[in-house]
Amino acid sequence: MVVHVKKRQIVLPGEILAEGNKFKSGEGTFREGDKILATVIGLAEIREDSVVVVPLEGVYMPKPGDTVIGKIVNVKLTSWDVDILAPYLATLSPMNVSGKPVDPVKTDLRRIYDIGDLIVAKILAFDRTQPPVLTMKEKNLRKLEGGRLVRMAPTKIPRLIGRRGSMINMIKKKTECQIVIGQNGLIWVSGSSPESEELVVKAIRQIEKEAHTTGLTDRIRELISQKT
């Protein structure tokens, strides 16, 4: 068996991933003779006895300067691993956290952020040769507590924000909810009641469904006005 790709390598449709009969053709692939080829643009992986391609459509690709919402998934001795819904886990180090300087040798980082914590951060650096590097040393970058998390296709986030923030500011004003938007497709919503949060979720779902249409801001305004 010959494997032609590295783990999480981006591949194109028709690209040969492996040859031989050791592995099965999994999701996002097909077999042609003794070759396994990709059917979609995505990330190649070997999973147990199968070769698969995870589609890139809808997957967030990090860009420096992006604001993202992430979940702490691992606490190391000198850093945190953060899931930002990208093909790669992001890294947050104590030097990029606001507040007093932290000596990771003397401090248990779990006292600051623990597994499962949600944070809003910014992509400080990313060039695909190393994991995305996060920072929380700017205004409004913090741990998120309470509220609820909503997922949206990253490509639809600009429509949720609207021109010069028109859409999202209107939703915030009419629902009186706090809303934090991550460009990785995660939105945090916190309101004074479950009903107000649910109204924001309904608005988000309608925006995602009708993002390509005109007059959407007026329809969302009407939806919120009817419910309030």
Image (cartoon, helix red, strand yellow):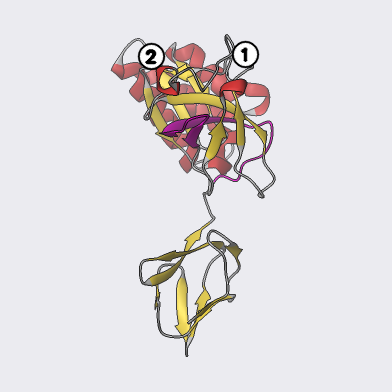
Quadrant housing residue 159 = top right
Looking at the image, residue 48 sits to the left or right of residue 216; the answer is left
Q: What residue is pinned by disc 2?
A: 191
Image coords of residue 123 (percent x, y): 63, 32
Q: Earlier in the sequence, mark 2 or mark 1?
A: 1
Element class at badge 1? loop
Q: How many marks?
A: 2
Confirm whether residue 211 shows in the render: no
The answer to whether 27 appears left or right of 141 in the picture is: left
| Most foreground residue, 26 or 100 | 100
Q: In the visual, does 35 lie left or right of 129? A: left
| Above or below 223: residue 191 | above
For image coordinates 39% across by 29% down, the residue present is 149
Rate crowding at label 1 as few (under 14), some (14 to 19) or many (20 or more) other CA atoms within 10 Å. Answer: few
- Residue 79 belongs to the span the image colors magenta: yes
Q: Amino acid at mark 2?
A: Gly
Magenta region: 60-83
Marker disc for residue 78: none
SS category of the residue bearing label 2: loop
Residue 126 occupies quadrant: top right
**Does the segment drawn in magenta span residue 110?**
no
Q: Quadrant of the C terminus?
A: top left
